[in-house]
Image (cartoon, grey):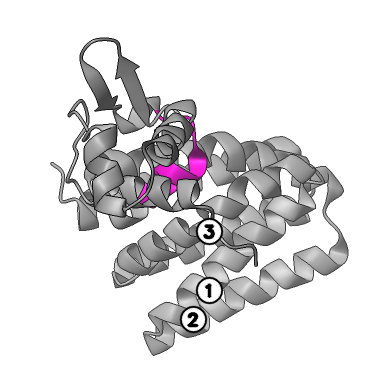
């Protein structure tokens, strides 16, 4: 593994402080002189680190005023956004937006998979649903989450679109963490099993539109369960 440069180390440390809430959105960050003293590096190194974060739209430079932190919604780095979401405060808006993203990508992937999925993939999907049932009966949240994630991963790859699976890979950690939270609720597990079984039936029938609708219903149920059992929204 390549060693991080001083510039990368300073940039990562500043991002850590932003994610931790030390510098909230629209707040000003310390100047080059202060940061160079804190890290015991040259001002040039600090300048390059801040340029790196500015290029990712994490920071913005306002001439004559200083360097400020942008809101998460303006950031241009998926890695940084996921880091902020997974390490920062767990709020309702982020949880809902994650489901919205899944709906946009996974319904399309499921539709594609219906006409491309292999018999072997269908067998693997059936096995994951059965393992979800067994984990539900045994109250094994870890096993339930593993099978849930594996089920969706099979569909993403069965879509035959290489970009879909690549786009989802960085989301794996945050999806795993959030599934572990929601899957502690037995009612959510039961709903998920029913939805996964319906998706499997649509894929087995190899009916693209039915598969899209089944996945969309799953996302709707997931959102309703999140609001009802986790966020306790009215």
Give the residue pinned by disc 2: 143
Contact (CB < 8 A) between labels 3 and 2?
A: no
Which residues make up the magenta segment?
Answer: 75-84
Which corner quadrant holds the C terminus?
top left
Find residue 101 and report its horizontal and vertical position in percent. 48, 37
Classify 10 Å Cα crowding around label 1: few (below 14), some (14-19), many (20 and above): some
Q: Is there any visible trace of residue 96 in the rendered image? A: yes
Of marks 3 and 2, which one's residue comes earlier in the chain? 2
Find residue 232 and report its horizontal and vertical position in percent. 15, 51
Q: Is there any visible trace of residue 221 in the rendered image? A: no
Give the residue pinned by disc 3: 172
**With respect to residue 186, does 114 lie above or below?**
above
Residue at (21, 40) in percent of width and height? 34
- Identify the secondary structure beneath mark 3: helix
Mark 1 or mark 3, which is nearer to you?
Answer: 3
Find residue 48 and report its horizontal and vertical position in percent. 46, 34
Q: Main secondary structure of the magenta part?
A: helix
Q: Which mark is residue 112?
A: none
Residue at (24, 20) in percent of width and height? 66
Apparent side of residue 117 relative to residue 214 in the rendered image (left or right) = right
Residue at (31, 72) in percent of width and height? 184
Residue 155 occupies quadrant: bottom right
| 33 vs 194, nearest the viewer | 33
Give the residue pinned by disc 1: 146
Determine the residue located farthest toward the bottom in the rendered image: 138
Contact (CB < 8 A) between labels 2 and 1?
A: yes
């Amino acid at each position: 593994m390549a060693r991080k440069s001083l510039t990368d180390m300073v940039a990562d440390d500043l991002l850590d402080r932003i994610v931790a809430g030390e510098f909230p959105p629209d707040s000003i960050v310390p100047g080059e002189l202060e940061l160079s003293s804190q890290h015991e590096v040259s001002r040039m190194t600090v300048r390059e680190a801040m340029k790196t974060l500015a290029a990712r739209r994490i920071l913005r430079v306002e001439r004559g005023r200083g360097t400020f932190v942008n809101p998460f919604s303006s950031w241009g780095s998926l890695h940084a956004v996921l880091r902020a979401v997974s390490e920062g405060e767990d709020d309702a808006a982020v949880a809902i937006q994650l489901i919205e993203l899944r709906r946009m990508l996974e319904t399309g992937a499921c539709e594609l998979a219906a006409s491309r999925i292999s018999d072997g993939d269908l067998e693997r999907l059936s096995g994951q649903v059965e393992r979800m049932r067994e984990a539900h009966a045994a109250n094994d949240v870890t096993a339930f989450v593993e099978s849930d994630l594996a089920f969706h991963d099979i569909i993403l790859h069965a879509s035959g679109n290489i970009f879909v699976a690549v786009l989802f890979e960085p989301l794996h950690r945050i999806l795993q963490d959030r599934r572990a939270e929601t899957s502690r609720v037995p009612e959510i597990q039961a709903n998920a099993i029913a939805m996964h079984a319906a998706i499997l039936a649509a894929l087995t029938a190899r009916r693209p539109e039915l598969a899209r609708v089944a996945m969309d219903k799953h996302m709707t149920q997931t959102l309703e369960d999140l609001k009802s059992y986790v966020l306790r929204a009215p």
